Amino acid sequence: MKKNLGLVAATFLLIQGFGVGAAMADGEWGAVATGANGAYGWAVNYPSEEAAKDAALSNCSNGCTTGVSFSNTCASIATGSGYFGWATSMSKATAIQNAIDNCGGSNYCSTKVWGCSGSGYTD
C-alpha cells in the first residue's frame, strides 16, 4: 500500500522522536532529517549523535525540522510520486529494500539515499 509522505513522516517522527532511533552507546552516528514536500537531510559517520543530527538538519534543502538518528547500522530513504519510506537494518541491502517496500514498492518509489554508519553491519 502506498503511503502519503506527510502521514508517514508525521507518524514516524511521533513514534521515534529526534535522536531515539537505533541508538547505541559507542560508535559512529548517522541521522536523517525530514521536512515538508519530501525534503530531507542526511548525515553518516559523525562522532556523536548531536553532530549527526546537526549535520542532517544542515544538509536539508528545504527546511527540515525533525528526524531520527542511528548508530552502527544502515539506513535508507525511498521516495516517489509524493510518497516516502525509510528503514534501518544491519544489512545495507535489507535497509534499501525495506525503505522501498515502506514507500509503496518499486512501482512507485526508488532509493533516494542510503548509508551505513559505524561498525557491525553487513554487506
Image: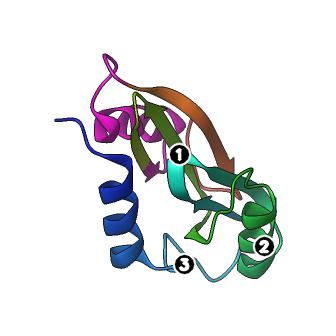
Cα distance in 3D space between marks 1 and 2: 19 Å
Q: Which mark is residue 105?
A: none
SS under mark 2: helix
Mark 2 surroundings within 10 Å by alpha-carbon count, few (fewer than 14), some (14 through 19), many (20 or more): some
Mark 1: which amino acid? Answer: Gly
Name the residue furthest top: 107
In this view, the residue in front, 28 or 43, is 43
Mark 3: which amino acid? Answer: Phe
Q: Nearer the viewer, mark 3 or mark 1?
A: 1
Residue on which the image places disc 2: 54
Q: Position of residue 79 (x, y in %)?
A: 47, 34
State which tag comes first along the sequence, 1 or 2. Answer: 1
Q: Are marks 3 and 1 in contact (CB under 8 Å)?
A: no
What segment is highlighted magenta in the picture?
87-108
SS under mark 3: loop
Mark 2: which amino acid? Answer: Asp
* Relative to 22, residue 107 above or below: above
* Relative to 26, residue 114 above or below: above
- Name the colour scheme: rainbow
Name the residue furthest left: 1
Quarter of the figure with the C terminus: top right
Cα distance in 3D space between marks 2 and 3: 11 Å
Quarter of the figure with the N terminus: top left
Q: Which mark is residue 38?
A: 1
State which tag comes first along the sequence, 3 or 1. Answer: 3
* Relative to 41, residue 66 above or below: below
Q: Which mark is residue 18?
A: 3
- Which image quadrant is residue 81 in? top left
Q: Position of residue 113 (x, y in %)?
A: 62, 37
Q: Are marks 1 and 2 in contact (CB under 8 Å)?
A: no
